Image (cartoon, rainbow, N blue to C red):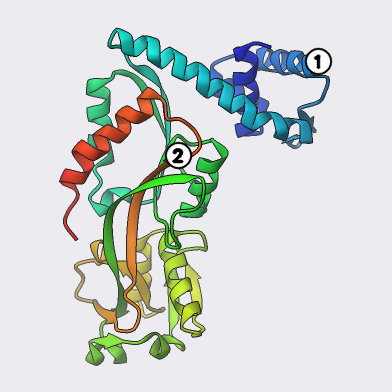
Amino acid sequence: MELRHLEYFAAVAQELSFTRASRRLHVAQSGVSTAIRSLERELGAALFERTSQKVTLTSAGLALLPEARATLDAAQAARDAVRDSYGSLSGTVTVGVIIGIGRVGIDLPGLLGRLNAHHPQVTVRLRLDPTGSAGLTRSLLAGDLDAAFLSFPGGVPAGVAARELLADPLRLLVPIGHPLIRRGEVTLGELADQPFIDFPPGYGNRELADQAFLASAVQRRVTLEVPDFTTAAAFVREGLGVAFVPRFAVPDDPGLRTLTVADAPLRWTLSVATSATRRPTAAVRALLDLIDAYVLHTAPAT
């Protein structure tokens, strides 16, 4: 069994496509297919179910995947130890990010620029997940991501190590002329009949609001789901509903006002997370060190 075979297997398992895996590996698709067939012959089991429409892991493939990743991680750690001995650092870091991370004061281009200046042989792959922080967490636990910037509204899940970078209170955004404006602050109970504009389930701010209403036994109506705060604010301005947004995302707009929620101090957080069960590579550690040295000192106070 060759490390190359395990690397190809892990790539196909992640992409669930021989074509995408070959592009990611910069190897001809025929070479990937040949390596997988060789591995299947050696193990005596099919690792993938292949049809003209999709590729899925078999039970044998599911059993092999964590072991393959552990073996590849161990091999990478050995390479890192040798490279560290003569001051060279290389490798690939796959980082998941939430939409709009730049608006919270995290200068991701600046951070990655500094990483590149210090370690030009390190390649960074950025990934967005349409299912938000929940999807990024699943990818992190599955080993598809090395690190992720995300929000944990219900606490850090098992198997994840996280460092909170910043926190920001949520504000209720309403259109000018809304009858609640004269109150200045409201309770969750007073919002039961309000149409809400919110992110889809899985995003940290959506989960935070859902949990608050559930804990207060108050039902709310989410009538529009949007993927970003700018769009949410535009819909609120048009009188289509109200929305919870972090303080950093409140637009300077004369057509909008913000209110605080008296009985539910909603606090949105941003963390950088890694797997608690996988040893980070030297390249991942370099990124985390830069986050400590750079991001934590440049993020705005909240």
Q: Residues within 10 Å of mark 2 (few under 14, many from 20)?
A: some
Kind of residue indicated by mark 1: Arg
- Against 72, residue 295 (above or below) is below
Which residue ends up furthest to the right in the rendered image? 44
Percent of width and height locating residue 287: 31, 31
Q: Is residue 39 left or right of residue 259?
A: right
Q: Residue at x 57, y 39 (%)?
A: 142
The residue identified by callout 2 is 127
Q: Is residue 213 left or right of residue 84?
A: right
Kind of residue indicated by mark 2: Arg
Q: Residue at x 43, y 59 (%)?
A: 155
The residue identified by callout 1 is 41
- Against 272, residue 179 (above or below) is below
Q: Residues within 10 Å of mark 1 (few under 14, many from 20)?
A: few
Percent of width and height locating residue 2: 64, 11
The earlier-in-sequence mark between 1 and 2 is 1
Q: Residue at x 26, y 38 (%)?
A: 291
Query: Exactly how many numbered labels are in the figure?
Result: 2
Identify the element where label 1 is drawn. helix
Quadrant in which residue 56 is drawn: top right
Q: Residue at x 23, y 21 (%)?
A: 118
Quadrant in which residue 167 is drawn: bottom left
Q: Is residue 154 visible?
A: yes
- Against 20, residue 3 (above or below) is above
Identify the element where label 2 is drawn. strand
Percent of width and height locating residue 284: 37, 29
Percent of width and height locating residue 298: 16, 45
